[in-house]
Image (tube, grey):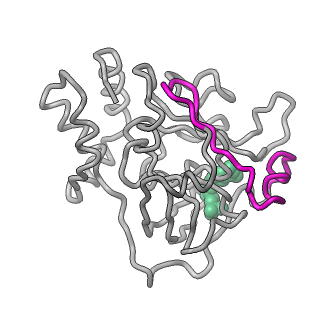
């Protein structure tokens, strides 16, 4: 990943916007994840100060729990059984024909089967999911780390966000804006706990929780955790997608930065 000057300024602006609270919370649990540091270490021409600020935002881990903490009945929310024809056809064949498309501002667009996704660098984490509706559940997730996957595709220097296009329409609309989608910035995309999960609690991801692939970006609220992910699109700006606010619920009034 190369970070040029213009992009750097934008990154810092994004970083400055929403992190004050997170930063306080994160101070005592800074973690030096070597992969992230190696990735970011490649950025050229950074001042020490800017780089340190970035490290803090990038490496603070969300709390992880033990097997004993796993919720017996992890709640399912939003779409739990998509009726969309393309999704139904995939689920009826056991997702044998599923492909994750990675495109947009990348050097090497990808189309990955579940077997290929399972062969990528993976991570398992037991974390708490917090929905803005006021409930939480703890679950164990295993999936492909997003950072290495994006490095495989090679982000172009203009890329600033990763958009997750989902299979389900949560609302019926004439213009397609009822289709679920989400977006995160590159800080979160390269965070150690950001994975595309294909397993939950040691079993294949159930349909209610987003089969065959869902995002887990553990420093964010529930609505960021896109289920039924079909396509990752690297973009410079998400203003042209959906209704322009960066996600299905953001388009309906939620904050884009859903940090916890
Ligand atoms: N594709 C898709 N992703 C989604 C949703 C959805 O309706 N569709 N709902 C969101 C909300 S608000 C929450 S709380 C979580 C619920 O995930 P769960 O069903 O695994 O609990 O998924 C999020 N991701
Ligand atoms: Mo939610």
Nearest the viewer among 45 and 174 is 45
Whether residue 232 sits left or right of residue 87 in the image: it is left
Please tell me which residue is depicted at 66% across the width and 57% down the height of the picture: 212
Whether residue 130 sits left or right of residue 79 in the image: it is left
Q: Which residues are magenta?
A: 82-110
Quadrant in which the N terminus appears: top left
Q: Position of residue 211 (x, y in %)?
A: 68, 59
Q: Position of residue 21 (x, y in %)?
A: 32, 47
Nearest the viewer among 56 and 163 is 163
Judged from this view, the residue extending furthest toward the top is 6
Q: Position of residue 149 (x, y in %)?
A: 46, 43
Ligand 1's image quarter is bottom right
Judged from this view, the residue extending furthest toward the bottom is 68
Residue 36 inside the magenta-drawn segment? no
Q: Position of residue 109 (x, y in %)?
A: 56, 30
Please tell me which residue is depicted at 64% across the width and 42% down the height of the picture: 249
Residue 83 inside the magenta-drawn segment? yes
Location of residue 120 with respect to 73 vertically, above or below: above
Q: Quadrant of residue 9?
A: top left
Whether residue 190 sits left or right of residue 90 in the image: it is left
Please tell me which residue is depicted at 80% across the width and 50% down the height of the picture: 87
Please tell me which residue is depicted at 27% across the width and 47% down the height of the picture: 23
Whether residue 45 sits left or right of residue 238 in the image: it is left
Nearest the viewer among 247 and 206 is 206
């Amino acid at each position: 990943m190369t970070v040029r000057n213009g992009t750097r300024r934008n990154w810092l602006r994004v970083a400055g916007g929403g992190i004050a609270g997170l930063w306080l919370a994160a101070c005592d649990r800074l973690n030096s994840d070597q992969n992230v540091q190696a990735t970011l270490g490649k950025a050229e021409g950074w001042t020490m100060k800017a780089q340190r600020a970035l490290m803090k935002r990038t490496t603070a881990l969300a709390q992880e729990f033990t097997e004993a903490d796993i919720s017996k009945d992890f709640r399912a929310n939003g779409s739990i059984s998509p009726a969309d024809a393309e999704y139904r056809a995939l689920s009826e064949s056991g997702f044998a024909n599923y492909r994750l498309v990675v495109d947009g501002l990348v050097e090497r667009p990808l189309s990955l089967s579940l077997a290929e996704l399972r062969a990528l660098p993976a991570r398992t984490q037991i974390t708490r999911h917090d929905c803005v509706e006021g409930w939480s559940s703890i679950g164990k997730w295993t999936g492909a780390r997003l950072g290495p996957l994006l490095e495989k595709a090679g982000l172009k220097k203009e890329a600033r966000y990763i958009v997750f296009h989902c299979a389900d329409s949560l609302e019926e609309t004439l213009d397609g804006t009822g289709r679920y989608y989400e977006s995160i910035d590159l800080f979160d995309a390269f965070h150690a706990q950001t994975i595309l999960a294909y397993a939950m609690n040691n079993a294949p991801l159930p349909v209610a929780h987003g089969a065959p692939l869902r995002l887990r970006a553990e420093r964010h609220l529930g609505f960021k955790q896109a289920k039924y992910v079909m396509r990752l699109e690297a973009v410079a700006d998400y203003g042209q997608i959906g209704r322009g606010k960066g996600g299905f619920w953001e388009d309906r009034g939620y904050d884009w930065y859903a940090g916890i």
